[in-house]
Image: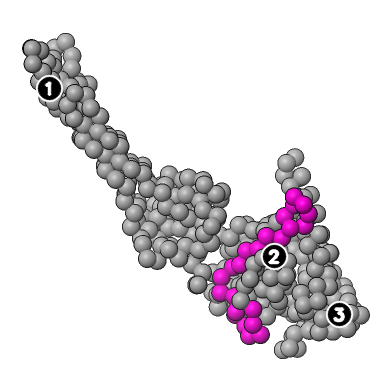
Amino acid sequence: MKFVDEASIHVSAGKGGDGSASFRREKYIQYGGPDGGDGGHGGSVYLQGDSGLNTLVDFRHRRVYKAQNGVQGRGQEKYGKKGEDVYIRVPLGTLVADILSELPLGDVTEHGQRLLVARGGRGGLGNVHFKSSTNRAPRKFTTGEVGQDIQLHLELKVLADIGLLGFPNAGKSTLISKVSAARPKIADYPFTTLYPNLGVVRVGIDSSFVIADIPGLIEGAAAGAGLGAQFLKHLQRTRILLHLVDIAPLDEESPRDAIQKLEQELVNFDSKLGEKPRWLVFAKADVLELGDAEKIASQVVNEMNWTAPWFVVSSVTGMGIDHLMQSIGRALEEMNELDAG
């Protein structure tokens, strides 16, 4: 399934029902007076977070949503029925904006969260409200208000604690399949990942974190080359970035060059991404002797004066994977403690 992270939809809230201009018509009651009830409010439109969704693909097939109108008021002070609300399910991490004004309307981040995007019109008043000592038989009533009508732009940003970043064939998909239940497509050719994959990594009885496999980048991704520009924004919500680099690439490009290109793409896209904690992970260590892999990694980090954590791992043999995951778990716990204050 192709990952869809942007969509435009048209939502219309319901019109409020008109008020009623009615008079009592009961036997043996003279001069019955007004008894027109109010109209029902129009239905509203909400976006509702659903953790079971991970794309906006459904909005390719349906783009228009309309809530029900309120029912007109009736005699005997009977109020019209309220129009039914419409709830549109969206994946967690959906940003919502008004296309016309370009103003943000909200952010859906929790399962079951409801965000009002179009309010239904208020029902009109019946003539019972306009009775007075000088006007005992008012024929006045008000019509229902029109509901809000709005064009929405939806944008999905993946909610994850850890973002895997690397060029094609760096080993991101293999790593996430090793440490979680996620099963991304894996092959020996570039660009096998076409949309972010989320996996839950458990590092204890009651401790876990979410890791996202972001599609591989190519040089110039921040400027729009390949799929990179579409997916770099998903890294904006992550707390730690893992730079995965092939320790022995087939194209003979040095790991150092790959790391520097990745860093440049981050800064070109969003300078704030460059300020996030970034760890270096040398992947595919199983293709070399253990001593050689450690030697190459140490040489690279020394040449770059790399001060952040770095790891040498193999997703095939499992070497270094547990240490990496446990280190991430401890770092996230420390971040949570700092946030809690």
Q: Which residue, given by chain and number where applicable, does mark 3 sit on?
A: 293
Disc 3 element: helix
Q: Is residue 53 above or below residue 138?
A: below
Comparing labels 2 and 3, the label whose residue is closer to the camera: 2
Q: Is residue 14 above or below residue 240?
A: above
Q: Which residue, given by chain and number where applicable, does mark 1 sit on?
A: 23
Question: Label 3 crowding class (10 Å Cα cut-off): few <14, some 14-19, many 20+?
Answer: many
- In terms of sequence position, does the residue under pointer 3 or pointer 1 come before the other? 1
Q: Which residue, given by chain and number where applicable, does mark 2 sit on?
A: 180
Point out residue 273 in the picture as x, y percentages from the top left corner. 66, 62
Question: Label 2 crowding class (10 Å Cα cut-off): few <14, some 14-19, many 20+?
Answer: some
- Tell me whether the residue at label 3 lies in contact with that at label 1, contact meaning CB atoms closer than 8 angstroms: no
Q: Which residues are magenta?
A: 186-208
Question: Label 1 crowding class (10 Å Cα cut-off): few <14, some 14-19, many 20+?
Answer: many
Tell which residue pokes out farthest to the front in this image: 27
Point out residue 215 in the picture as x, y percentages from the top left corner. 61, 72
Point out residue 17 in the picture as x, y percentages from the top left corner. 23, 37
**Main secondary structure type of the part rendered in magenta:** loop
